Image (tube, rainbow, N blue to C red):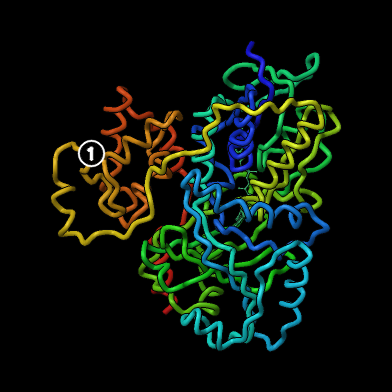
Amino acid sequence: MSIYDVVIIGAGIIGTTLARELSRYRLRVLVLEKEYDVSMGATKANSAIVHGGYAESRATLKGKLCYPGRCQFEQLDRELHFGFDPIGSLVVTMEDAREPLEQLVQQGTDNGVPDLEILDGNTVRAMEPNLNPGVQWALYCKGAGVCSPYEMAIAMAENAVNNGVVLRLEHEVQAISSRGEGFVVQTSGGSFQGRFVVNCAGIYADRVSHMVGAGNFSIHPRSGEYLLFARGTGQGVNSVIFRLPTAMGKGVLVTSTYHGNLMIGPDASDDSPRDDTSTHMERIAAIYQQSRQLYDGMDPKKFLRSFTGIRARSSDNDFHIEESSVPGFFHAAGIQSPGLTAAPAATERLIKLLAKSGLTLEPDPGFNPHREPIITRKELRPFPEVKHLIDMPSAPEKIICRCEQVTEAEIVDSLHRGIRVKALDGVKRRTRASMGWCQGTFCRPRIAEVMEREYGEPVDNRFDIEHSGVSRVTRSDFLEFFQRRQ
Ligand SMILES: Cc1cc2nc3c(=O)[nH]c(=O)nc-3n(C[C@H](O)[C@H](O)[C@H](O)COP(=O)(O)OP(=O)(O)OC[C@H]3O[C@@H](n4cnc5c(N)ncnc54)[C@H](O)[C@@H]3O)c2cc1C
């Protein structure tokens, strides 16, 4: 049985960022992920906001780690090219009362956030012309922004693998036992031995911790649904727009995604089963109505799709980043928002704790922090200019996905980066092919052809079939509901 210095359970943003950070050192690191790809949990479906760092109190780990995490995004994006844009954020209020915003400024200042400013309604409306004219005040955070979260986790994982980390997909951890100075981790794909184990299992982190008898928390999933609109619709909003936070979280926001789609959501419900990512017409309609009170730039005909993310809320509503009661077994659990933003700081904390517990951190001179992008953010070219590229026979410049103008070369590149891409959806998250208006009707058979040619075997459609089994509000459901309402 191979022996690893560190075994990481879960390849979300925490597991992949930790793996990449550990690959700076002369260590044997293994990542075990139960799904067919990295970034399949909360990291795939969230608001994608790089938060300012003012919304949580310093008394919590969430509050302590958010701003230090945010500060690392520019550098990480320069190295890994996953997409980060500091477009700024606004917390707006329709009430003529500055106090709640001043409290957030105070909280942010206590957290070390330097770029907070309260703006009056006129200034805010000049920045955001589509905002409800009733907005009275807003808290502006200049350095907050948006990123592409699954591209970030993919970039982290690719870079980690290229620096020597071993990634095992479709390896579900099923049991863990102590052995000597470490652990034996049993998975659906075999057993592995590790001196240290880090539990980054998202909504299953409590179950994983119980395997080793180390659970001092439970996970209470809270789902959030979203509406995503067509590419280009994000142009009407210049920053991330929030309302004042409530006990249920930061509430429904309006933003452009990194790639220019208008996105609204999430709501919050504690009633769904742990991994239920279906969406529901009544919830989608309620989010739409709430967002319209805030922002008047939505065209329902441009609705593209709905999706759900599941927050891994812990019993005390805070992150658990600690060595557990079982020496050598660490938790990175309860990582709900702002977990994406905090990830770089959360993993720094984990590495310090691992070192304190005896992990030797000898720098690896061969570590390469750089990863080339697969795609970069781009404006789409007019259809007549690209039509000949769609119709041409196989060639690097041939366009495979006409909605997002993704080329054959980009798809081929995504398949040869050290992580076997097992499903069409894996190509989608790496290249945006099939994220456009037709949602893959045109390009999915063409992507399958390229994958089959490159890998020399048919695409295993098991994963895409499982994915398509989730019940979601579609464009036609949404439009029908909307027309009935009018
Ligand atoms: C609706 C919503 C909105 C959010 N918005 C934001 C935001 O705007 N900004 C922000 O900073 N944060 C946001 N967050 C929080 C952020 O998305 C999460 O904190 C972050 O993605 C958590 O990453 P993770 O690696 O801990 O978990 P995950 O991404 O869930 O990864 C856990 C991984 O563990 C794997 N796993 C589970 N059990 C096992 C097992 N037994 N064996 C092997 N593998 C296993 C899973 O398959 C999964 O891949 C939001 C979250 C949600 C749900």
Q: Position of residue 462 (x, y in %)?
A: 42, 32
Q: Can you see residue 242?
A: yes
Is disc 1's CB within 8 Å of ligand 1? no
Picture layout, residue 440 above or below residue 67: above
Quadrant housing residue 241 = bottom right
Q: In this view, which residue lies farthest toward the top?
A: 1
Which quadrant of the render holds ligand 1?
Answer: top right
Q: Residue at x 60, y 71 (%)?
A: 242
Q: Position of residue 203 (x, y in %)?
A: 66, 43
Q: Residue at x 41, y 58 (%)?
A: 259
Q: Residue at x 53, y 47 (%)?
A: 44
| SS for callout 1 | loop
**Amino acid at pointer 1:** Pro
Picture layout, residue 111 above or below residue 430: below
Q: Which residue is mark 1?
A: 396
Looking at the image, which is closer to me, 384 or 311? 384
Q: Position of residue 154 (x, y in %)?
A: 49, 40
Q: Position of residue 151 (x, y in %)?
A: 48, 46
Looking at the image, which is closer to me, 182 or 481? 182
Q: In this view, which residue lies farthest toward the right?
A: 325
